[in-house]
Amino acid sequence: QQQVKQSPQSLIVQKGGISIINCAYENTAFDYFPWYQQFPGKGPALLIAIRPDVSEKKEGRFTISFNKSAKQFSLHIMDSQPGDSATYFCAATRSMDSSYKLIFGSGTRLLVRP
Amino acid sequence: EAEVAQSPRYKITEKSQAVAFWCDPISGHATLYWYRQILGQGPELLVQFQDESVVDDSQLPKDRFSAERLKGVDSTLKIQPAELGDSAMYLCASSLSSGGANEQFFGPGTRLTVL
């Protein structure tokens, strides 16, 4: 029940295309869903996050879509660029309860071809 | 820009040896986390500190791992003795306070290889 399942494991997209990464969770207590971006040799960095009171959040070329009833959320990268090539992790937690830790998905390695 | 510092960046050791990793969080961050990231997987929390107190060490293998944050600032994670299965990236992160919605800032990690 604490798991966050992420797919696909790897993704290859042409420059200018749309990259889509999906995550699913079981624990209905989760109410905060961040996405992290990790470049080789670096630690993960927060990219964008959403709460379940909205169905979509957009920041630049990055959009999170959230489906509360299906307990699924996804990251869309519009106009994908080679510089977006990285590993992306979805995560989930209960924001107001400090006893809840951040649960990460297994990651998606994105390669954007020029 | 303030960053989380970690050292060493890489560590190669033989099994049964002791290893130690150091983390210096962003100044003013009360909460410090140690994660283990196995290749191809997401980070998994090992231990969380609020100031100098441990608030979650449920996933820390306490027979061989120990962590301390004596003055509530920098922290050390130790493994003794190291086992082959400990090979992984060890990430340190910090946040202003606890609670899942507080952004966690990660350091570059220490890549441990146990031979």
Image (cartoon, rainbow, N blue to C red):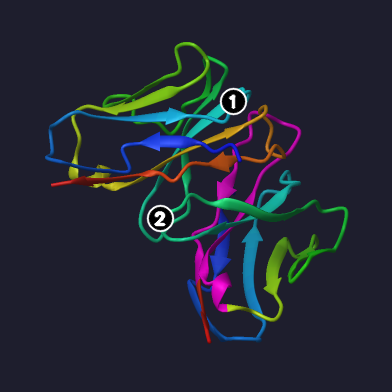
Q: In which quadrant of the rendered view does residue A70 lie?
A: bottom right
Residue visible at 30% across and 26% down? B78
Asked if the magenta segment contains residue A92, the reply would be yes
Q: Residue furthest top?
A: B71
In the rendered structure, the answer to whether residue A14 lies left or right of residue B59 reads right
Tell me the amino acid under the disc marked 1.
Ser
Tell me the amino acid under the disc marked 2.
Gly
Residue A1 placement (x, y as % from top left): 59, 49
Subunit under mark 1: B
Badge 2 and badge 1 in a common chain = no
* Location of residue A52 with respect to A69 vertically, above or below: above
* Residue, disc 1: B27
Q: In which quadrant of the rendered view does residue B15 lie?
A: top left
Assign the N terminus of chain B to one quadrant of the image. Answer: top right
Q: Nearer the viewer, residue B51 or B80?
A: B51
* Residue, disc 2: A41
Query: In this picture, which residue range is highlighted in magenta?
Result: A82-109
Subunit under mark 2: A
* Location of residue A77 with respect to A23 vertically, above or below: below
Residue visible at 71% across and 64% down? A73
